[in-house]
Image: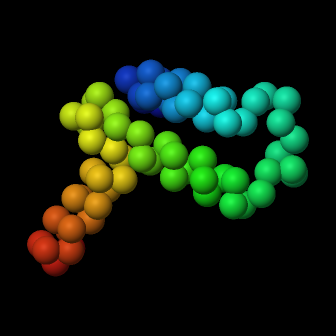
C-alpha cells in the first residue's frame, strides 16, 4: 500500500463487509442483487469521519457542487 494513512479506513471497511461476507463464502454463490444490497447498506451507514453523514449523502453533495460549477 502506497498510502499508509488509508490503512485504518481500509481495515474498517473490510470489517464492515465481513458482517455480510464471511471468509469461507463462495464468491460464485453471491448474486449481483446481494452485492448491491451490501453496497446500499454500507453507503447508508453514517460515519464519524464524515460528520455523521452517510457516504451517499457526501457523494450527492459533491456531485451537486460539481454540476453547479460546470465541471
Q: How many marks?
A: 0
Residue at image coords 22%, 59%: 61
Q: Position of residue 18 (x, y in %)?
A: 66, 30
- Figure quadrant of the C terminus: bottom left
Choose top left, top right, bottom left or bottom right for residue 46.
top left
- Residue displayed at 85% across by 29% down: 24
Q: Is residue 52 visible?
A: yes
Q: Position of residue 50 (x, y in %)?
A: 26, 37
Horizontal side of 6 relative to 10 (left or right) equals left
Q: Position of residue 41 (x, y in %)?
A: 51, 46
Q: Is residue 63 above or below residue 50?
A: below
> Is 57 positioned to the left or the right of 36 in the image?
left
Q: Residue furthest bottom?
A: 70
Quadrant hosting residue 22: top right
In this view, which residue lies farthest toward the left? 69
Going 55% across and 50% down the picture, which residue do you hit? 39
From this view, report whether residue 42 is shown above or below residue 30: above
In front here: 59 or 54?
54
Q: Is residue 14 visible?
A: no
Q: Is residue 25 left or right of residue 47?
A: right
Which colour assignment does the render follow? rainbow
Residue 42 point in image, percent of width and height: 49, 43
Measuring 23% from the left and 59% from the top, which residue is drawn there? Answer: 62
Amino acid at each position: 500500500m502506497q498510502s499508509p494513512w488509508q490503512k485504518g479506513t481500509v481495515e474498517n471497511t473490510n470489517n464492515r463487509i465481513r458482517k455480510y461476507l464471511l471468509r469461507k463464502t463462495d464468491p460464485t454463490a453471491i448474486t449481483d442483487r446481494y452485492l448491491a444490497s451490501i453496497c446500499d447498506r454500507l453507503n447508508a451507514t453514517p460515519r464519524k469521519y464524515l460528520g455523521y453523514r452517510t457516504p451517499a449523502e457526501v457523494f450527492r453533495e459533491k456531485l451537486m457542487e460539481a454540476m453547479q460549477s460546470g465541471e
